[in-house]
């Protein structure tokens, strides 16, 4: 009973002795080590390496950089899908972007850009080709067009869902893999993947919250697709005549299919009978290439009237007058106001042309179903012997023009469009006319004034003229096509044409609608149907 238990006595006996030994050793060390060593703090591994621990915000920024770079690399590697959309084979991809939106690339025709959403991600859709089998099936069975819209919608929805799943996998994999390479710690690598997924989800929420389905009404075309507005008519007929375009889609698909294999043409629609097409140009500044561009636009868009808001010349001398002669052969009436680089000599020369209507001092003319009034600029910059009037003189001239417009309205003949060169003059007409056009700034402005008048300032159709060769970068060539209703003579929409300046290496067309047209629903009763023709459409040629 009183015997010791084997295996248990030795540890119980040794434990007190070991603890006592440790206390003695600790006291000896305390008294024997140098005082300097006692005062020296323990050095960390970071101190031994000559570095200090990184600050929290530096560490956070480095982690964010790893996450963004890894996610981007993941999207580049596996973040795209191939999916059929109707008769087309497409490749869908999500790309990092500061502005968001969607871009549809139709090689070799060009590209179509939509302001569809605001997020740090852009949706790229590359149309690789039109499948000949599916396209021919549509041509052989036109009844399938009735369900084509639903089919395309289903294909896009399915492709988007698959792209979302693949993008999540790509983002997580890329960020996790790069985090593992950089940090060599599984926990931090997984944290990077989780943060990447969070950022992608936040981007998706941002895109959903800012989704703009009406962006398709204001697309921006580039490349050969800059001819697209003339293919589909005016803005109103796009909405009200969709059934007509649907019936003609078989013909369009057939021709585009041939275009991929060889050269072909696209069908062209005649302009809507209820639409007046006006071409707004300005600040040509002696650039002879402008006449070729204007002539091409007149033919391509079937322009009814050209409105020039001045500065056609550079010095206004009689020696320059011969530059104006091509106006006779542009194929449309030409309404012109004097700019600050145009002289009275220039004005007198143009007044002799049969197709030119010169506006000055509030004069009003009837052209192509429109009543247009305007005034010339009060300043003539090249004349150094006279002081330049400045803003005050321009505003005073604008008040005179506004008074003339009010007189026209009281007489029962209200003016549809007013024209001035200086925007300071044009602004004074607010409340007296629906639309006023100007130039002078070499930059576009679209502004709804407080009184209800819309001010549209056009850029330089001559690309700055002789000044273009003096700048570091060539100034762009700009013009606009205005669509006005023939009965109300109100602005329906406008296309902004932008060319790349000297060399004309790029061409863009963007369609815009007034705010009131974007808000209201499409009218129930369709306007007269355009009839298709087989005449070819050509892109704006480079002079």
Image: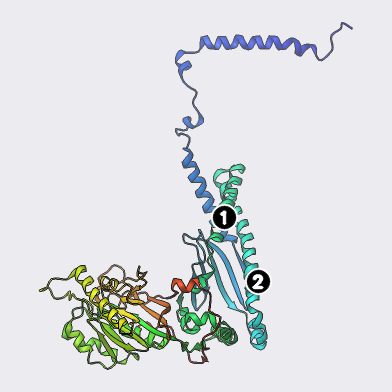
Look at mark 1 in the image and give the residue it sits on: 200
The residue depicted at 57 percent of the width and 58 percent of the height is 204
The residue depicted at 84 percent of the width and 9 percent of the height is 4
List x then y, in percent, for residue 100: 49, 62
The residue depicted at 50 percent of the width and 78 percent of the height is 108
* Closest to the observer, 391 or 158: 391
Q: Nearer the viewer, mark 1 or mark 2?
A: 2
* Closest to the observer, 102 or 2: 102
List x then y, in percent, for residue 154: 65, 71
Extreme-top residue of the structure: 2
* Count of residue discs: 2
Quadrant position of residue 148: bottom right
Q: Is residue 169 above or below residue 361?
A: above
In the picture, measured across the screen, residue 263 lies left or right of residue 540, that is right
Extreme-right residue of the structure: 1
Quadrant position of residue 147: bottom right
**Disc on res. 154:** 2
The quadrant of the rendering that contains the N terminus is: top right
């Amino acid at each position: 009973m009183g015997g010791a238990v084997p295996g248990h006595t030795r540890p119980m006996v040794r434990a007190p002795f070991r603890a006592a030994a440790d206390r003695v050793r600790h006291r000896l060390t305390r008294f024997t080590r140098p005082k300097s060593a006692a005062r020296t703090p323990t050095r960390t591994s970071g101190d031994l390496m000559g570095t200090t621990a990184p600050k929290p915000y530096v560490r956070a920024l480095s982690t964010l950089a790893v996450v963004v770079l890894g996610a981007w690399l993941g999207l580049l590697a596996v973040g795209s899908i191939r999916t059929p959309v109707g008769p087309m084979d497409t490749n869908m991809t999500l790309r990092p972007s500061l502005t968001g939106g969607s871009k549809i690339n139709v090689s070799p025709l060009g590209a179509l850009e939509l302001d569809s959403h605001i997020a740090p991600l852009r949706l790229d859709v590359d149309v690789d080709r039109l499948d000949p089998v599916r396209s021919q099936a549509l041509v052989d069975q036109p009844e399938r067009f009735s369900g084509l819209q639903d089919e395309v919608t289903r294909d896009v929805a399915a492709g988007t869902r698959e792209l979302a799943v693949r993008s999540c996998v790509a983002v997580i994999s890329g960020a996790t893999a790069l985090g593992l390479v950089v940090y060599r710690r599984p926990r931090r690598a997984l944290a990077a993947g989780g943060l990447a997924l969070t950022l992608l989800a936040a981007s998706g929420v941002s895109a959903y919250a800012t989704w703009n389905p009406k962006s398709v009404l204001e697309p921006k075309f580039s490349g050969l697709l800059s001819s697209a507005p003339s293919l589909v008519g005016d803005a109103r007929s796009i909405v009200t005549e969709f059934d007509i375009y649907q019936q003609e889609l078989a013909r369009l698909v057939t021709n585009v299919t041939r275009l991929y294999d060889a050269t072909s043409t696209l069908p062209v629609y005649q302009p809507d009978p209820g639409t007046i097409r006006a071409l707004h140009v300005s600040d040509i500044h002696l650039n002879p290439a402008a006449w070729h561009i204007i002539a091409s636009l007149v033919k391509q868009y079937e322009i009814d009237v050209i409105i020039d808001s001045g500065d056609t010349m550079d010095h206004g001398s009689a020696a320059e007058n011969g530059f104006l002669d091509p106006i006779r052969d542009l194929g449309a009436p030409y309404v012109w106001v004097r700019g600050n680089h145009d002289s009275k000599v220039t004005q007198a020369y143009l007044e002799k042309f049969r197709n030119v209507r010169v506006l000055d001092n509030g004069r009003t003319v009837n052209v192509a179903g429109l009543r247009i009034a305007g005034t010339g600029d009060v300043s003539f910059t090249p004349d150094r012997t006279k002081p330049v009037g400045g803003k005050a003189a321009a505003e005073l001239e604008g008040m005179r023009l506004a008074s003339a417009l009010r007189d026209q309205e009281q007489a029962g003949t209200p003016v549809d469009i007013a024209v001035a060169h200086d925007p300071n003059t044009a602004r004074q007409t607010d409340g007296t006319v629906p639309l006023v056009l100007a130039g002078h700034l070499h930059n576009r402005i679209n502004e709804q004034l407080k009184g209800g008048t819309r001010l549209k300032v056009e850029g330089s159709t001559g690309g700055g003229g002789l000044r273009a060769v003096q700048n570091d970068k060539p100034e762009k060539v700009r013009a606009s096509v205005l669509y006005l209703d023939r009965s109300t003579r109100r602005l329906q929409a406008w296309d902004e044409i932008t060319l790349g300046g000297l060399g004309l290496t790029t061409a863009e067309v963007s369609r815009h609608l007034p705010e009131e047209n974007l808000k209201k629903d499409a009218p129930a009763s369709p306007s007269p149907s355009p009839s298709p023709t087989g005449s070819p459409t050509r892109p704006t040629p480079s002079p």
